[in-house]
Amino acid sequence: ETVYLNDKFVAADQAQVSVFDRGFLFGDSVYEVIPFYQGQGFRLDEHLARLEHSLRGIQISIARDWKAILTELVAKNGGGNLSVYLQISRGSSGQRSHAYDEQMQPTVFACCNPIRDIYDEGPDSIAGISAIVTADLRWHRCDIKATGLLPNILVMQQARQAGATEALMIRDGLLTEGASCNLFMVDKGVIYTPKRSSEILGGTTRELILELAAVNGIPTQEVDIDYDHLMNADEVWISSSTRAVVPVIKIDDQLIADGKKGPLWARMFELFTRYQRD
Ligand code: PDD
C-alpha cells in the first residue's frame, strides 16, 4: 500500500508523523473522503471546493495540485474503485501549545481504501438500515470537515449498542444529519432535507441528490425537520460519498412507513447510477 505524506509517495509502513503534530494532539486538521471509480474521482471538484472551505475555515493556507496528486495516488494503489482519505493538519512545532505560529508547515497525508461499486452491484445489493435519533453534541462549525470526530464516534457506538447502523442527530428539536452522512426524508412525493448551515456538513452527495431531483422534476425543500415529521415520513434516506444514498427503514425501533425501501429511493438510486456512468 502506497500513501502520500508531505509531497512524497511512500510505503504505508514507512510513513511517519511527529508525535507533536497538531492533528494528533488537538485534532487541528481537516479532511476529505473522495470516491474514485475505475481510477476517476467522483465529484472531485466539489470535494476540492469543500476542502478549500474547510482550510479557509481554520486558516490553513496551502496550495497543491490535489487532482494530480490524488489521481496518481489512486493509480499507484492499482486504480479501480477506491476511496481516498486526505487529511491536512496544521503541522508540528515540536511542542504542545494551543497557540500556533502562522508560518507552520502543514502535514498532508492521503491514503486509499477499497470500496464497492454499488452502481455496478445495483439497487438490490443495498439493504435498508436502522437508525437511532440522539443528541447532537458537536460544535457549531459542522460545515468545516474537521477530524475531531469524538461526538460522531460516540453516537455511532451508541447506535451499534442499540443494534442500529446509523445515528441521526437532533439539536434544539431539529434533525441535523447522521454521524457521517446527511439526512433526507420523503413526504407525499416531496424530498425534504435540513437547510445548509454551520450545524451540518455541506455534503457533496446531498448536493447531487438536490441537483438530480431538480433536473428530473422531483420537488425538493430545504427545511427544518423535527422528530414527528421524520417518524411519519414515507421514506427516510441518508447520503454520503462512500454509501451514496441508502434507505433508512427503521428508526428508534419503529418502522418508517411499511418498513420497505421506498419507490423514490429506487428512482434516486437509478438517477445516481445513470449519472455515475456518463
Ligand atoms: N463523511 N455529514 C457528515 C458529518 C459526514 O461526515 C459526511 C461524510 C457527510 C456526507 O458528505 P459527502 O456526501 O460529501 O460524503 C455528511 C465521510 C464519508 C466520512 O467521514 O467518512
Image: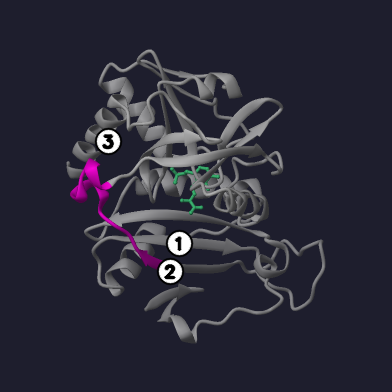
Q: Are marks 3 and 2 in contact (CB under 8 Å)?
A: no
Question: Quick one: quadrant of the C terminus?
Answer: top left
Q: Residue at the location (39% across, 30% down)?
A: 259
Can residue 224 be seen in the rendering of this structure?
no
Q: Position of residue 106 (x, y in %)?
A: 61, 66
Q: Which mark is residue 269?
A: 3
Hey, what amino acid is under mark 3? Answer: Phe
The residue indicated by pointer 2 is 111
Label 2 element class:
strand
Label 1 element class:
strand
Q: Nearer the viewer, mark 3 or mark 1?
A: 3
Hey, what amino acid is under mark 1? Answer: Tyr
Q: Position of residue 232 (x, y in %)?
A: 49, 19
Q: In this view of the protein, which residue sits in the foreground, 88 or 119?
A: 119
Q: Residue at the location (42% across, 39% down)?
A: 239
Residue pushed farthest top? 188
Relative placement, left or right, of 20 versus 1 is: right
Can residue 153 be seen in the rendering of this structure?
yes
Does 231 appear above or below 56?
Answer: above
Q: Earlier in the sequence, mark 3 or mark 2?
A: 2
Relative placement, left or right, of 276 versus 50 is: left
Measured Cα–Cα span from mark 1 to mark 2: 5 Å
Q: Quarter of the image holding residue 274?
A: top left
Does 246 appear above or below 214?
Answer: below
Does 2 appear above or below 108?
Answer: below
Q: Are marks 1 and 2 in contact (CB under 8 Å)?
A: yes
Q: Nearer the viewer, mark 3 or mark 2?
A: 3
Instruction: Tell me, yes or no, whether the highlighted magenta stretch contains residue 208.
Output: no
Magenta residues, as a range?
Answer: 111-125
Label 3 element class:
helix
